[in-house]
Every structure is written in C-alpha cells, then in structure tokens.
Amino acid sequence: GVTQSPTHLIKTRGQQVTLRCSSQSGHNTVSWYQQALGQGPQFIFQYYEEEERQRGNFPDRFSGHQFPNYSSELNVNALELDDSALYLCASSSAGTGRNNEKLFFGSGTQLSVL
Amino acid sequence: GESVGLHLPTLSVQEGDNSIINCAYSNSASDYFIWYKQESGKGPQFIIDIRSNMDKRQGQRVTVLLNKTVKHLSLQIAATQPGDSAVYFCAERTGGFKTIFGAGTRLFVKA
C-alpha cells in the first residue's frame, strides 16, 4: 500500500517541513492533498513521471518532487498556523489522457504548526 | 464553481437498515464521480465510482445513483453494519487530474 512518514509532526511558524510518501507498487502517479479538520481533502498537486502536471490553489510555498522509483516528497516553506492539517498522499496508475484512475491513499501525516 | 456539497453533515441509522448518503455537485462538466470512505486515523478508501454516461452502478452492498439533470449523486448502503461507521465523501472529476472532494457526511450505525 501507500506509506507516509512521519505520522505526526510539530513545527513552529516560519519553519520548513518535508513529508514523504512511498507509492503502491506499480503506480506511477502521486497526488498530494491537504485535509483540514472536519473538511474534505483539498488537492495540492499531482506528479506523473517525475513532473508536476496539475496544481491546485496553493501558494508557491508548497512544492514537491517525485523520484525515479515514483516515491514523492511534499515540501512546505515558511509554515503558517493555517498549514496545520492532515496531509494525504495518494498513488494511482495513470497514463496520459486518462482521468478515471482510482486513488489509493496513505494514512497521512498530521502536521501541527505552533 | 468547483464545489461538491452534501445535504446532511451527519446520518444515524440502525444496524441492518439501509443508508442513503446524498451529494450535490455544481459543475455540470464533471464526468466522473467517486465515493470514498474515511475511517478515523486513516486515509480515504475507494468505495465505488460512476461515469457520467451511466445513472446507476452497483457494487457489493453499495449502489451509486447519478442524476445529471439536478446534479445529484447518492450512495446507498444495504444492510448497514457497525463497520460502515465512517465519514463518506463524494468526489468529482472535471477533466484534468484533480479530484474535488466534498465536505463529507459522518455515518453513525447504532447497534
């Protein structure tokens, strides 16, 4: 399955954080979502073949990377209090032009910004 | 705009009864819809999906209905069990690769 690390993280405002995700075997696409308490996940961006191919409405402080083995990192710079949330990684197996691939989610990283 | 909403934030049902979770979507261009289940401490889990050229799809104990005329989606769970207690999200795709989630409905199953 999809594994994420760490499971919990506490940072202070202004710091930087890196979250990690290992895709499910055979999956070449990784999407990152932010889920605030009591809300649905919000799309941050998606990586396919090591390139960002779509981005949601998040500032440039949010950046990512996908490695040749399809694992991924989410980086957030200059942390703000509102960045406190559950960060979810989802992997899928997609080719170009397809939009109906199923997302397989990890259990997330709970980030608290103090 | 981009929004997927839900009619009810919480739903409480008796074990063994059928559950119906409703969802309204706003983008008439959406062509793919998905239901996810999220249990406490876990990420969302795929339940069932439906494309816009269909109006009904059945899985194991679950059925999804799509009414494009009124932009409404529903999830029916037959013979609801305690293990069905979770938050349920409807989600949509409008081309591209972004999945848009609604706010979720919490389902409580009473024994």
Image (cartoon, grey):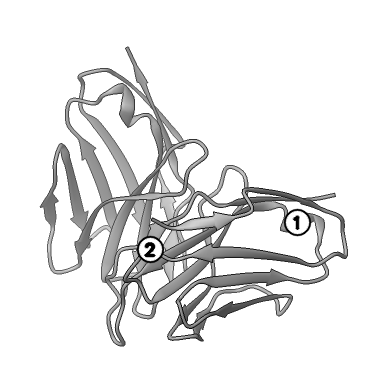
Quick one: SS at disc 2? loop
The image position of residue A114, as x and y in percent, is: 85, 49
Residue tagged by mark 2? A24
Residue under the image location 35 percent in, 74 percent down = B94
Q: Left or right of B97: which side holds A101?
A: left
Q: Nearer the viewer, residue A100 or A93?
A: A93
The image position of residue B57, as x and y in percent, is: 12, 53
Q: Which of A110 and A59 is in front in this view?
A: A110
Q: Left or right of A5: which side holds B67?
A: left
A100 in relation to B4, above or below: below
Residue under the image location 12 percent in, 53 percent down = B56
Kindly indicate the quadrant of the structure image that contains residue A83: bottom right
Asked if residue B60 shows in the view, the reply is yes
Residue under the image location 13 percent in, 58 percent down = B55
Quadrant (top left/top right/bottom left/bottom right) for the C terminus of chain B: top left
Residue under the image location 35 percent in, 71 percent down = A27
Query: Amino acid under label 1?
Result: Asp
Kindly indicate the quadrant of the structure image that contains residue B109: top left
Chain bearing mark 2: A
Residue tagged by mark 1? A82
Query: Amino acid under label 2?
Result: Gln
